[in-house]
Image: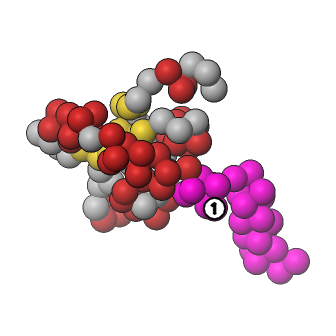
Amino acid sequence: LNMLQQYTLYLSGTSIYNICPAKMFEIMASGGILVTNSDIEGDKGWGLKELFPEDSLLTYNCSDYSDLIPNVSRMLENKDLREHTREVALKTIQTRHTHDIRIRQITNTLKKEFNL
């Protein structure tokens, strides 16, 4: 946790398999600001919009990276924007992505699938 809290922004991205890396949750839970590629539209999307509100992270265009530097610069220069993003990210983790919440989701899915 101490190591994660030493940095302001964390550059991440989906893998070649279009999945959400676990480190995204760790970064946001530690108070860091996640910088990741935007979700791919359509069937190839990996669920970024379903997992996190738009103002809880910073995205960049994954086709040409044209907005990466301007977006990061804006975030680094604006303390209020950084604080807002951190607050929304932490609230999102606490209300949507804790172990207890995930266990309930898995349990409910198993009950539904197996008529338990």
Is 71 placed above or below 88 here? above
Query: What residue is rendered at 48% in x and 55% in y?
Result: 88
Image coordinates for residue 99, horizontal then vertical, percent: 74, 51
Question: Which residue is pictured at 63% across the width and 26% down the height?
Answer: 1
Span of residues in magenta: 91-116
Name the side, left or right, on which 9 lies relative to 63: right
**Majority secondary structure of magenta residues:** helix
Query: Residue 8 is drawn in which quadrant?
Result: top left
Q: Toward the viewer: 57 or 2?
A: 2
Q: Residue furthest right?
A: 116
Residue drawn 72% across the image and 61% down it: 101
- Indicate the quadrant where residue 109 lies: bottom right
Instruction: Check the picture and name the quadrant holding the C terminus.
Output: bottom right
Magenta residue check for 97: yes
Query: Is residue 34 toward the left or the right of residue 97 in the image?
Result: left
41 relative to 34 in the view: left or right? left
Which three-letter amino acid code belongs to the residue tagged 1?
Thr
Query: In this rendering, does residue 14 appear at all?
Result: no
Q: Residue furthest bottom?
A: 115
Percent coordinates x, y for residue 10 in the rendering: 40, 31
Magenta-span inclusion, residue 73: no
Residue plotted at (27% across, 41% down):
78
Query: What sort of colour scheme is used for the picture?
Result: secondary structure
Q: Secondary structure at mark 1?
A: helix
